[in-house]
Amino acid sequence: MLWLALMLTACSAPRYGSGDGAFVLTTYTNVEMGYRTVVPLRWQQIDSTQWMRAADERDLTGLIQLSLGSLTRAELEAIGKQQLDLEEFPAQEGGYESDHLTWELYEFEIFDDDVGQMRVKMGIAQGADGWYAVLVIGDPREVRKTAGYYNTLFKHVLYNFEPLE
């Protein structure tokens, strides 16, 4: 029965993107981190906060969703710089308002010793219980080539991200 329910959900879920970049989103609740969100249905779950598309062994496209707790803005930026190995916290490039949170938007590149240059689309928002972050990461060439795919995925995740009460 569970298999049938999953199949019906997958078949009836709306598809986003186009061609090879199409994806289906499904609801995901992370009780431990205190949020409900959406994730691409057939992506590999790495842990409770990270999902990888893994279309092939070279595919670096990933989605990270985090609850960062009650930090000050300075602490948030310091942790962001450290975790992303940035000299400076990036400049805000816009904003996005969902029904649940008001997001600050950022786009920048990072370098990873293992995989090389990566393009990051990041949203951060402060809720009643602290800060939240959403990051979509991919190869910079692919992100530029398929910008609509990344923008659609990013905006749908931000729109559906909801802190649990």
Image: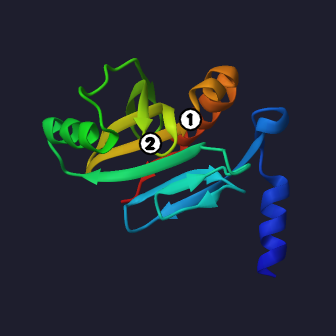
Q: Position of residue 61 (x, y in %)?
A: 60, 42
Q: Position of residue 157 (x, y in %)?
A: 55, 42
Q: Which mark is residue 154?
A: 1
155, 106: nearer the viewer = 106
In this image, 135 relative to 74: left or right?
right
Question: Marks 2 and 1: in contact by CB < 8 Å?
Answer: yes
In this image, 153 relative to 163: left or right?
right
- Amino acid type, callout 2: Val
Q: Residue at x 52, y 42 (%)?
A: 115
Q: Quadrant of residue 75?
A: top left
Colour scheme shown: rainbow
Identify the residue under disc 2: 134
Q: Position of residue 76 (x, y in %)?
A: 22, 41
Mark 2 crowdedness (10 Å alpha carbons): few <14, some 14-19, many ≥20 = many
Q: Residue furthest front?
A: 113
Mark 1 crowdedness (10 Å alpha carbons): few <14, some 14-19, many ≥20 = some
Query: Where 51 sits versus 94, above or below?
Result: below
In this image, 152 relative to 136: left or right?
right
Q: Quadrant of residue 81?
A: top left
61, 34: nearer the viewer = 61
Q: Position of residue 41 (x, y in %)?
A: 70, 56
Q: Residue at x 79, y 58 (%)?
A: 10
User: Looking at the figure, which quarter contains the C terminus?
Assistant: bottom left
Comes first in the chain, label 1 or label 2 = 2
- Amino acid type, callout 1: Phe
Please count the marks in the image. Answer: 2
Q: Which mark is residue 141?
A: none
